[in-house]
Amino acid sequence: MKKYAAMILAIILVFSFAACGDKAGTDLAKVGDEVITSSELDQYVELYAFVQGMDLTQITDEKSMKYIKSLMLEDMISMEAMKQHFAGKEDEVLPETVDEDLQKFIDDSKAEEAVKSFLEEKKITDEALTRFYLSQYYTTAYFDEIEAGMPNLEADAKAYYEENKDSFAVDEVTASHILVDNEELAKEILDKIKAGAKFEDMAKEYGTDGTKDTGGSLGTFGRGKMVKEFEDAAFALEPGQLSDVVKTEWGYHIIKVTDKNQGIKTYDEVAESVKATLVSQESEGKIKELRDSIGVEYLTKEYTGEIKES
């Protein structure tokens, strides 16, 4: 069920900590017969931050860190519950090539210098990497199970689309620009382009920002991504049109729009993401039921399952 990979990324990380080091630290929560400790939680937060590109050193106040750890502990509890749900059914969840695939995952992780340094610094073991890798299969199996219990998913997805069409609106342009710091120079360049000079060549010759190396390309962007003066000019153009000289805080621009996409995405374009949303919504209640059936006990006053944003 690769279509749910992005949706479950945050959840699948949790298994990695069941085997990181020993059971040192304070017991925080008990899921069935499995205890999650403060040491495991601390390592989970570190790994999650690494994968997501978060800089934990920027979080200096205790309340914010406590909030993050509370969320992460809930993830750990939910993931442990999913694993226990499939106890005795591992052969149905894991592929036949799991051993070979797992070894390749571990080898590839250690071959990446940044990852290798992180694993060594945080003392993340091969066993921890194993749990991390295998977790994706249990999570995928659980979401597959939820989806299988939604026989009207296609009809529900179409209904959701019709009821929320505005949320699928698209308003974006694909554009290039030439940025210079002199208005007169900008006018001269514009005249040269109108006289037949290639926009990309002019960008490479005169541009003053990093886009000059790619012919001035800015790629595709929606509203709110550029300063107002630039945005107003770009969205007023049709594909193939050039702007007049546009002044912003960055200097003087000549803008060329090569594509424009406005309107509502079709159902076919968004069907998979809509279904993933509905499965995710359904999973919230199912995971709560699963946790209740397996049994979750909080073992400290610090973490009680009540999440308070700082």
Image (cartoon, helix red, strand yellow):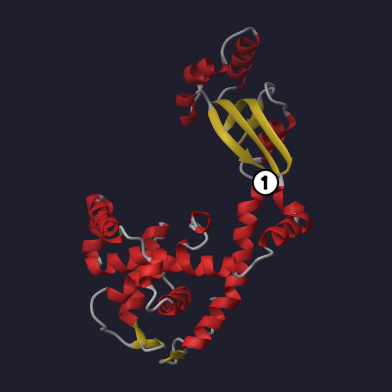
The location of residue 81, given as percent across then percent down, is: 44, 79
Task: Residue at the far top: name it.
Answer: 195
The location of residue 226, given as percent across then percent down, is: 62, 40
Q: Amino acid at mark 1?
A: Asp
> Does residue 230 appear left or right of residue 178 in this picture?
right
Q: Nearer the viewer, residue 138 or 162?
A: 138
Image height of 212 relative to 29, above or below? above
Answer with the quarter of the image where residue 222 lies.
top right
Image height of 126 relative to 85, above or below? above
Image height of 58 relative to 222, above or below? below
Answer with the quarter of the image where residue 182 lies.
top right
- Residue at position x 42%, y 76% in the image: 86
The location of residue 4, given as percent across then percent down, is: 52, 58
Task: Residue at the far right: name it.
Answer: 163
Label 1 residue SS: helix
Few, some or many residues within 10 Å of mark 1 (<14, 14–19, 20+): few
Q: Nearer the viewer, residue 235 or 266?
A: 266
Residue beneath disc 1: 268
Residue 56 visible in the shown view: no
Image height of 138 relative to 299, above or below? above
The location of residue 42, given as percent across then percent down, is: 34, 75
- Residue at position x 32%, y 69% in the image: 131
Residue 194 visible in the shown view: yes
Q: How many marks?
A: 1
